[in-house]
Amino acid sequence: MLLGRNSKCWCGSGEKYKKCHMEFDEKLKQFAREGYEIPTRDMIKNAEQIEKIKESAKINTAVLDEVEKHIKAGMTTEEINTIVHDFTVANGAIPAPLGFCGYPKSVCTSVNDQICHGIPSEDVVLKDGDIINVDVSTIYNGYYSDASRMYMIGEVSEEAKKLVQVTKESMELAISKVKPWVPMGVIGATIQEYVHKHGYTVVREFGGHGIGLEFHEDPFVFHYGYEDEGVIMVPGMMFTIEPMINQGGYDLYIDQNNGWTSYTKDGKLSAQWENMILVTEDGCEILTY
Ligand code: MF3
Ligand code: CO
């Protein structure tokens, strides 16, 4: 369909095309002519969607804060699941993981050498010195949000602390590079360079993802690679950055009993931090702080 200058814009804003995304489309076409990958329209959120998704993200952040208040040695990961589930529901929201592709619980709790998708269990008791990633995802009024943090239980070894810290810094550094009209590859390149400098490796099988109207949308967000790769970021794009960083090698295996939980192959520690990012006119906004 040909979009006239005076037609309503494709983004759903209700504005005329010429006043909304017309210039934007021209600019993107120029990037395409220069050989860059450009985002598809379904990767771009309008103002109304952004407001709704922010409400979901706010609850998601409150859930992580609630976990932070209670998490301690002696607690089981099942208890974390209960905190997440009950707090989410009490806020009128739904835990996105529950039933997602058959996932059995309301949150992912990944301890020590577990990379991601650790399943809460009464058999997993947190002990002094553990590091754990709690990955919370929320649906509110049909809109999705997703973020995770690391928690250190009691006295943690210096090497574990450093892994957790460097992983967080790699995410923050990558976020600081997010701005419109730059290829997404800058995210992976930044993370990879930073963690390699500290002797760590980047997990390759999992990445960040578009989010908002669905749990996992395009694009896939690489946490390694080259800065001139990937789609051009544009205002209204929303995605997670969630590097999984290993102390040893990046190879992993998946628990064949539950089909979900991934572990480092060498049994060394893994850490992860995740935030949801909105690309704005002049940079980006973190939606999950
Ligand atoms: N929260 C994870 C992510 O960051 C996805 C978990 S899928 C689940 O993308 F089913 F395990 F919840
Ligand atoms: Co995610």
Image (cartoon, rainbow, N blue to C red):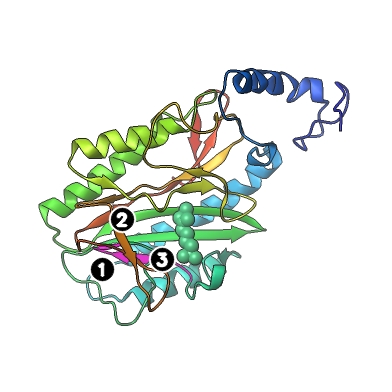
Q: Quadrant of the N terminus?
A: top right
Cα separation, mark 1 vs mark 3, equals 17 Å
Q: Position of residue 83 (x, y in %)?
A: 42, 71
Residue 108: mark in rendering? 3
Q: Residue furthest left?
A: 158
Query: Counting other residues with Cα less than 10 Å from the Cα at mark 2, is it few (<14), some (14-19), or many (20 or more)?
Result: many
Image coordinates for residue 181, horizontal then vertical, percent: 54, 23
**In the image, 289: left or right of 273?**
right
Q: Start and end of the magenta stretch?
A: 106-114
Q: Quadrant of residue 192?
A: top left
Residue annotated with mark 2: 150
Q: Which residue is mark 1?
A: 72
> Which amino acid type is marked by label 2?
Met
Quarter-of-image position of residue 13: top right
Q: Is residue 229 left or right of residue 49?
A: left
The residues bearing labels 3 and 2 have C-alpha atoms spaced at a distance of 12 Å
Which residue is at the front of the view, 82 or 123?
123
Q: Which mark is residue 131?
A: none
Does the beta carbon of the residue at mark 3 sit less than 8 Å from ligand 1? yes
Q: Nearer the viewer, residue 146 or 188?
A: 188
Relative to 245, does residue 104 appear above or below in the rendering? below
Front tag of 1 and 2: 2
Q: 206 or 135, which is in the foreground?
A: 206
Q: Residue at x 63, y 19 (%)?
A: 33
Q: Nearer the viewer, mark 3 or mark 2?
A: 3
Compute the Cα span from label 1 to label 2: 13 Å
- Compare marks 1 and 3 and give the one earlier in the sequence: 1
Q: Are marks 1 and 3 in contact (CB under 8 Å)?
A: no
Q: Earlier in the sequence, mark 1 or mark 2?
A: 1
**Residue at 49% from the left image edge and 68% from the top image edge:** 87
Which residue type does callout 1 highlight?
A: Lys
Task: Please tell me how crowded label 1 is: few (under 14), some (14-19), or many (20+) other residues with Cα within 10 Å.
Answer: some
